[in-house]
Image (spheres, rainbow, N blue to C red):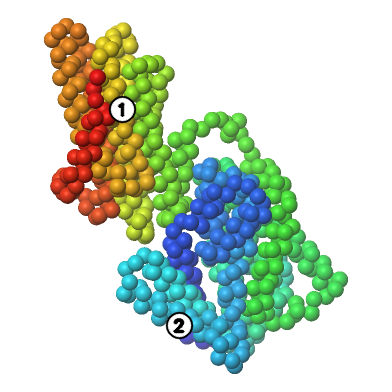
Amino acid sequence: MDFFSILTMLGGLALFLYGMHVLGEGLSRASGGRMEQILERLTSGRLRAVLLGAAVTAVIQSSSATTVMVVGFVNSGIMKLSSAIGIIMGANIGTTVTSWLLSLSGIENGNFWVQMLKPSSFSPILAIIGVMILLFSQKDSKRNMATIFVGFAVLMFGMDTMSGAVKPLADVPEFANLLLLFANPLLGIVAGAVLTAVLQSSSASVGILQALCATGAVSYGTAMPIILGQNIGTCVTALLSSVGTSKNARRAAIVHLYFNVIGTAAFMIVFYGLHKVIGFPFVDMAAEPFGIAIAHSAFNIFATALLLPFSELLEKLAYLTIQEDATEHAAVRYVEEDIRALDSRFMQNPAVAMEQCRKVTSHMADTAADACRRAARLLHNYSEEEADRVRQMEEDVDRYEDVLGTYLLRLSGRELAERDSRTLTLYLHSIGDLERISDHAVSIAMAYREMADKKMAFSNKAQEELTVFTKAVERILVLSMEVFVKEDGMLVYEVEALQSLVDRLAVEVRKRHIKRLRKGKCTIELGFLLSDIVTAYERIAAHCVHIAVRMVQVQEDSLEMHGYSEELKEKDRERIHLLYEGLVQEFLLP
């Protein structure tokens, strides 16, 4: 084997690894986060967890990616460790799909249609279709499918190139002697584990082993220990991803390692024990890609069937390895749990990261809106606890803004689907408005606190007017949050009409207060507090309109607030006016 043959082999390996990366990336983007959502919603059922883990891994073509996602879900508190164990087992089965696809390259038959089943025969067609779509289509769904086609074609071309380059090794005595070393099961396991740990993919290392089968020098006796080692080596990715995570997340990663180590030990005892008693004739036979795929699947199915009934013991073993401390069961505030959901591991899969952002941003919006509602209730039912709760919620919203803003900026540098990209832009421009809404809620609460401290109270008439005014603001708050969370632009007209109503009510409330002041029915100090409360409500309504209108702007690729708002009113003035007239009748001041 000369220098150029080695160069060809390394080039084939590079294409093989790159094709696997592109294929996995395309499959992940095409799933649009749906596979990850299925994993996330899993709550119970061992067998169901295994099947889902296998299915998701078969789709995204990476047990490492599935396991890393599971570690992230456990770390963020979304998934329990007991549910994660079944998914991890299923991921080991799902990853064998790649080896079955690669084994098709060994089909030998003169029939045209049988030959077309070989990946080397149909992958050029996929490459042509994929490249044409990438060149001439701008639609995300089609481009994702094209990426899958091209990735698969590059993967198979790399596989064929490797196989062709290593064939001459069959005549090299040194290569045969090297493989004899790996016939020792322990050395074979170590070799497989190291190779997979370096490549960070058991599918890739199994593919390389299948390519080496082209030499005819790899026996099943040599291949079996390497396959077992490859399953142990793939645990490195999850272990690395668990560094710096919660204890439960680290336990999920360690369960993956224990599953493969215990499964390997049990399989070796059974396999070599039976071989010693019965004697398997295929052990000394030259391995084929198809046989490698069978062995890969057989081990993972055996390990899962053996250990699934003892998943609780695996969980206890993980707890013994990473023990609890006194503080682990202390109550954790829901905001911190949400923030943990923004796990950096999800950055490797932008669709998952964006789904987490949707949930956390929705919770941020709910918190800001709830702070306003609690502040409004202080008018009739003031309590120090509720006023403190409003301030605490404002601090929570501040925390959301800091962490979400940073996470969204990092995510904006990743390749996102068009819808996710628009949503990300909306969130980046809106979280500031949500933070300001909570600030104004605190201003309202502090005004009522001052009144309580000084034992002051608004007149009955003023309280009735503020009640109507508050209900109008709460309506615009509810609608704008619905527009924001559901991205429903049809409600923006009512939001615009409500802002006009809030502006009108604010003017009327101030006028009536001045009249009472002139008649001596109110004090100047109460007047200042009333003005502060009304101003805070006006600003809350303004931020609500910003959020609602911006959602429509982002959908139409426009971020000019003033110009767009004027255009919207000009185009739909009649509709907004009719809505406004109806609201005026509904929110009449007493």
Q: Earlier in the sequence, mark 1 or mark 2?
A: 2
Q: Residue drawn 69% across and 71% down?
A: 295
Judge left or right: residue 382 versus residue 110: left
Q: Position of residue 250 (x, y in %)?
A: 58, 46
Judge left or right: residue 476 versus residue 165: left
Q: Position of residue 20 (x, y in %)?
A: 49, 70
Which SS class for mark 2? helix
Identify residue for label 2: 124
Q: How many marks?
A: 2
Residue occupying the far right of the picture: 277
| Crowdedness near tag 2: few (<14), some (14–19) or many (≥20) residues, C-alpha within 10 Å | some
Q: Which mark lies nearer to you, 1 or 2?
A: 1
> Which picture quadrant has residue 532?
top left
Using the numbered discs, state the Cα–Cα distance from disc 1 to disc 2 in whole angstroms.
65 Å
Residue 396 visible to the viewer: yes
Q: Residue drawn 64% across and 39% down?
A: 323
**Near-viewer residue (412 or 420):** 420
Quarter of the image where the C terminus is located: top left
Asked if 439 appears above or below 288 in the picture, the reply is above
Identify residue for label 1: 471
Inspect the image, locate mark 1, and give the three-letter code of the amino acid beneath it: Lys
**Near-viewer residue (575 or 92):** 575
Residue 194 visible to the viewer: no
> Which picture quadrant has residue 367?
top left
Inspect the image, locate mark 2, and give the three-letter code of the amino acid beneath it: Pro
Identify the disc placed on residue 157.
none
